[in-house]
Amino acid sequence: MASVAGWVAGGTYSAAKSWVIAFSESLATELAGTGVTVTVLCPGLVRTEFHRRSRISIDKPDALWLDARKVVRDCLRDVGKGKVISVPGLIYKGLAWLARVSPRGFVRSGGKLTAHRPPLR
């Protein structure tokens, strides 16, 4: 399980999720033609206990939150289609696409907007 955060510059969490995406794509390539498939799930914000238990702020606009059951349904549909990457939700599909096709400098600048601490001076 990865995250759309894997396509932005957002610290250790983003770096770890980026690795999961790259590993999944590599594994899918290695396993092509064997009958074994790989699908990596890359959701955005999902309404679960995770944020509350982690004491992470949940004061994001409702439009950014995904329903966990719908995320699972969308991912299983993508598995059935043989997709390697599953990004549920139209907003997150758009953001993921934008992050993948944009110049890395632009993406890194966007990562500053999601930083969890003030920049060092």
Image (spheres, rainbow, N blue to C red):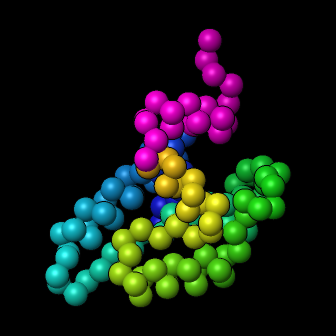
Which residue is located at x 30 percent, y 80 percent? Answer: 37
Percent across and percent down for residue 99 are 49, 47
Which residue is located at x 20 percent, y 75 percent? Answer: 31
Q: Is residue 109 magenta?
A: yes
Residue 27 falls left or right of residue 91: left
Closer to the camera in the image, 51 or 61 = 61
Residue 17 falls left or right of residue 23: right
Closer to the camera in the image, 76 or 49 = 76
Can residue 46 be seen at all in this image of the molecule? yes
Can you tell which quarter of the image residue 121 is in? Answer: top right
Residue at the top extreme of this rendering: 121
Q: Is residue 56 magenta?
A: no
Q: Which residues are magenta?
A: 101-121
Percent across and percent down for residue 71 are 61, 76
Percent across and percent down for residue 105 are 46, 30
Can you tell which quarter of the image residue 94 is in? Answer: bottom right
Question: Considering only vertical position in the picture, is 73 above or below 88?
Answer: below
